[in-house]
Image (spheres, rainbow, N blue to C red):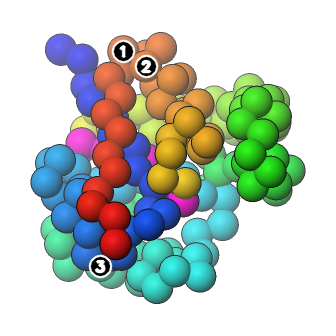
Amino acid sequence: MRKTVFTIGYEGLDPERFTMALTDAGVGTLADVRAVANSRKRGFSKNALKAGLHAAGLAYDHARTLGTPKAGRQAARADDAALMRKIYCEEVLDTADGSLALDALCDLAVRSPTCLMCFERDPARCHRRVLAERMEARGFITVDLFGAEI
């Protein structure tokens, strides 16, 4: 039986709608795949996010190693998804540490319905799409969540 991995970006969502999208989908664990788990948006910095998820009965895991390096984030902001993907693969996924972190993420997703989270609403503009593709190569099915925008 193939396992499902979910993805979500919190762009355009408030914490309540974000959490509702996760619970409605049956997510058990949120895997925060940001290199830096801080946000200017209320409720989405690591501690506030973790507390809000815990209150809703969801687990939180910060998979910092799988975050996008600064150059990749700059490429994403410049809307250069191809460059972001290249940087992300070379500097993260195709390294020994990245491979181990991906193994751990896959193990987590087998144990608990897991959702990969970053900022961008559109998964095609985010490194979580690349992560999901690597997980698909290991037998996972990807479902992108969007939630109701504010």
| Three-letter residue code for mark 1 | Gly
Farthest-out residue, right: 71
Quadrant of the rendered image containing residue 94: top right
Give the SS element for disc 2: helix
Q: CA distance from mark 3 to mark 1?
A: 31 Å
Looking at marks 3 and 1 on the same chain, the residue that comes earlier in the sequence is marked by 3
Residue under numbered circle 1? 139
Residue density around tag 1, few if under 14, some if 14–19, many if 20 or more, within 10 Å:
some
Q: Position of residue 148 (x, y in %)?
A: 27, 61
Mark identifier at residue 41: none
Q: Position of residue 146 (x, y in %)?
A: 34, 51
Q: Position of residue 34 (x, y in %)?
A: 60, 58
Give the SS element for disc 3: helix
Q: Nearer the viewer, residue 27 or 40?
A: 40
Residue under numbered circle 2? 136
Farthest-out residue, front: 150
In this image, 54 relative to 130: left or right?
left
Give the SS element for disc 1: loop
Where is the C terminus found, in terms of image quarters?
bottom left
| Three-letter residue code for mark 2 | Glu
In this image, 38 relative to 59: left or right?
right
Residue 6 versus residue 134 in the image, above or below:
below
Residue under numbered circle 3? 52
Give the magenta range.
112-119
Q: Residue at x 56, y 36 (%)?
A: 124
Tell me which secondary structure the magenta stretch mostly adopts: strand
| Three-letter residue code for mark 3 | Gly
Q: Residue at x 24, y 42 (%)?
A: 113
Q: CA distance from mark 1 to mark 2?
A: 5 Å
Q: Are marks 1 and 2 in contact (CB under 8 Å)?
A: yes
Q: CA distance from mark 2 to mark 3?
A: 29 Å
Quadrant of the rendered image containing residue 15: bottom left
